Amino acid sequence: MKLRLAAAALVCAAFTFVSASAFADSIKTDFDHHANFANYRTYSWGKVKVSDQFNADRIENSVNSLLKKKGWKEVPSGGQVSIMATDNIHNEQEAETYYNGMGGGWGMGWGWGGWGWGPGGGFGDTTTTTTDIRNAHVVIDMFDSSTKSLLWRGVSRGELSNNSAANRKHLHQDIAKMLKDFPPKSK
């Protein structure tokens, strides 16, 4: 009995982990593989174009604190790297369809084996609901200030909550994930 309870608990824990990771934000980064990031140590902020001015400050503060830990220094202007950020907040519709009462279909109707659309056959009822979901994309770009070429890009995509504190926390966590392996190692 104890073994069955332990197995059930393990299955529930695995399902919870998989479910939680399915709803996690999507983080992607890319960089110029020919750039030598060891040559860069200073940066300046360029344009930060976001839909909510509070997010501009949050993005800058998160990036500043994380880059400082990596030995980079912010300068008011003329940094070796220019950082720019944008966001896009939009609604998307999600449709979910539920099939109710699939019916017999095989074995209850007419003919050999009972297949067909007779009594007990068919597909039953379907119900479709649509839900509006607020999504946000945040893009952070780093350019070489002298050549204006793109050096690095981080993109975060995720669902927004109705809780602003949770959104602030997720924004910082997403930026931390973006910059986790920064600066990248050139090949």
Image (cartoon, helix red, strand yellow):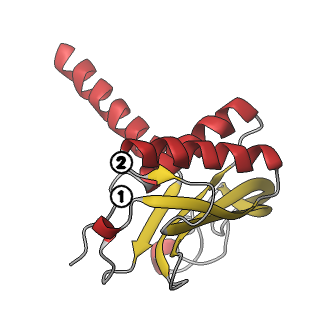
The image quadrant that residue 104 belongs to is: bottom right
Which residue lies at the image location 56% right of the left edge and 43% below the top edge?
A: 62
Left or right of residue 67: residue 5? left
Residue 187 drawn at (x, y percent): 20, 78
Q: Name the outermost residue toward the top.
A: 2
Quarter of the N terminus within the rendering: top left
Depth check: 111 or 185 in front? Answer: 185
**Tally of numbered tags:** 2
Q: Which mark is residue 70?
A: 2
User: Which is in the foreground here, disc 1 or disc 2?
Assistant: 2
The residue to which callout 1 is attached is: 182
- Examine the rendering and report whether any part of residue 107 can be seen: no
Depth check: 12 or 100 in front? Answer: 12
Q: Earlier in the sequence, mark 1 or mark 2?
A: 2
Residue 109 drawn at (x, y percent): 59, 70
Q: Residues under labels 1 and 2: Cα distance?
A: 8 Å
Q: Amino acid at mark 1?
A: Phe
In this view, 34 is above or below 174: below
Residue 180 drawn at (x, y percent): 37, 51
* Cβ–Cβ under 8 Å for marks 1 and 2: yes
